[in-house]
Amino acid sequence: MQASQGLRCRDLNADREVGSYWEGCLIDMAVNQYGCVAEGKQMGRTRSAVALSANGGLILPDVQLSKGGVTIVPEVKHKDPTRYGQYGYEEYRLDDLVEYAKATGLQVILAIHDHSLAGGKNVTQNRVRDWRWQDVLVLAERHDFSRPGLTWYAGKKVIRNLLYWDVSRFLPLTTHPFFASKTTKILRRDPSRPVMQGTLF
């Protein structure tokens, strides 16, 4: 099966703004509806946040969510399937996510806001039913198609290998334990505690 070329890499700053918006949407939903503690690792940055390893820098996933003593780390994407019904992602980024997951023992997921379900690429309404997810270790086991394609790397347009998976291999976000049920009690910041810049509460 072949993937469609699509229109990619028109404007790096615009792509970053869109990515940051949907990272914020996932954080807001996770915190205010599902009782998570969240940290945006890439938000507000002009260069990707990285972790150091013996193999060099690993680009970090976008968001860290904790709940009930468990932490997951989503990589957030706002995209739709190709005309062949597949989601695509850069192989070099998947390699980083897999290495990070194996080194930390944390579950790293690819969390996709599917704008074909939401009403279009420029939609701003955030609904949990429009999100899909899969564990990156599962994705790394097998992909359905691959080809070289245009992407951003170090702020430049480059050709890198892209991997594709059928959308049926992704699950509704509500099947993940963190999002299986909405919280009925949200803890709010103690007003006597100092507020630090960048905190959520």
Image (cartoon, rainbow, N blue to C red):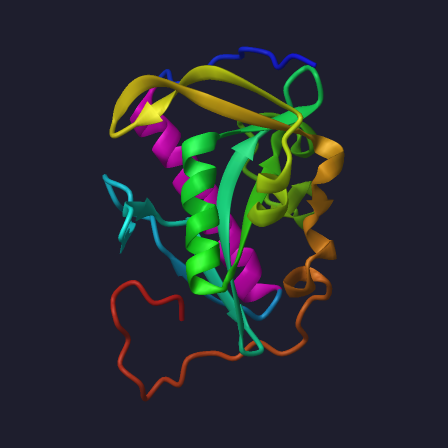
Q: Nearer the viewer, residue 104 or 157?
A: 104
* 136 to the left or right of 142: left
Residue 160 image point, x, y percent: 40, 21
Q: Main secondary structure of the magenta part?
A: helix
Q: Nearer the viewer, residue 116 or 100?
A: 100
The residue lying at 48 percent from left, 46 percent from top is 75
> For residue 15, which quarter of the picture?
top left
Residue 80 visible in this rendered orientation of the protein: no
Q: Quadrant of the C terminus?
A: bottom left
Q: Give yes or no for residue 115 being in the magenta stretch.
A: no
Which residues are drawn in magenta?
Answer: 11-33
> For residue 164, which quarter of the picture?
top right
Residue 51 image point, x, y percent: 29, 54
Vertical comparison of 17 with 37: above or below: above
* 93 to the left or right of 78: left
* 53 to the left or right of 104: left
Residue 107 image point, x, y percent: 54, 59
Vertical comparison of 149 with 114: above or below: above
Residue 71 image point, x, y percent: 51, 67
The residue lying at 67 percent from left, 26 percent from top is 144
